[in-house]
Amino acid sequence: MAEVMRMTEMIFPVTGAYDFGLIADYAKTHSSEDRALIIDVGDGTGFALRTIIREHPEILAS
């Protein structure tokens, strides 16, 4: 599954589908450890969420 996600990322980048910078900007002024701004509800290994967090470290991961 991980290999499929990597290949898919090359063709259709996770962060190319949506501007997660909007969430990152919001997180800068509204960060809270008791409220998630983004969640990964997939059935994989969290590849998409890790990619988003890597590009936008302002979005806190917990």
Image: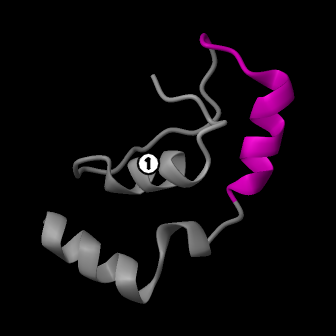
Was residue 59 drawn as part of the magenta stretch in this picture? Answer: no
Predominant secondary structure in magenta?
A: helix
Residue 51 falls in which quadrant of the image?
bottom left
Residue at figure coordinates x 49%, y 29% from the top left = 61
Tell me the quarter of the image containing the N terminus: bottom left
* Residue type (three-letter) at the residue carrying disc 1: Leu
x, y (%) of residue 3? 15, 72
| Numbered disc total | 1
Residue at figure coordinates x 23%, y 52% from the top left = 44
- Where is 32 relative to 2, above or below? above
Left or right of 21 on screen, residue 1? left
Tell me the quarter of the image containing the C terminus: top left
Q: Which residues are magenta?
A: 20-34
x, y (%) of residue 19? 71, 64
Q: Residue furthest right?
A: 29
Q: Residue furthest top?
A: 34
Residue with the mark numbered 1? 49
Q: Residue furthest bottom?
A: 11
- Where is 15 relative to 41, above or below? below
x, y (%) of residue 43? 25, 50
Residue at figure coordinates x 46%, y 83% from the top left = 12
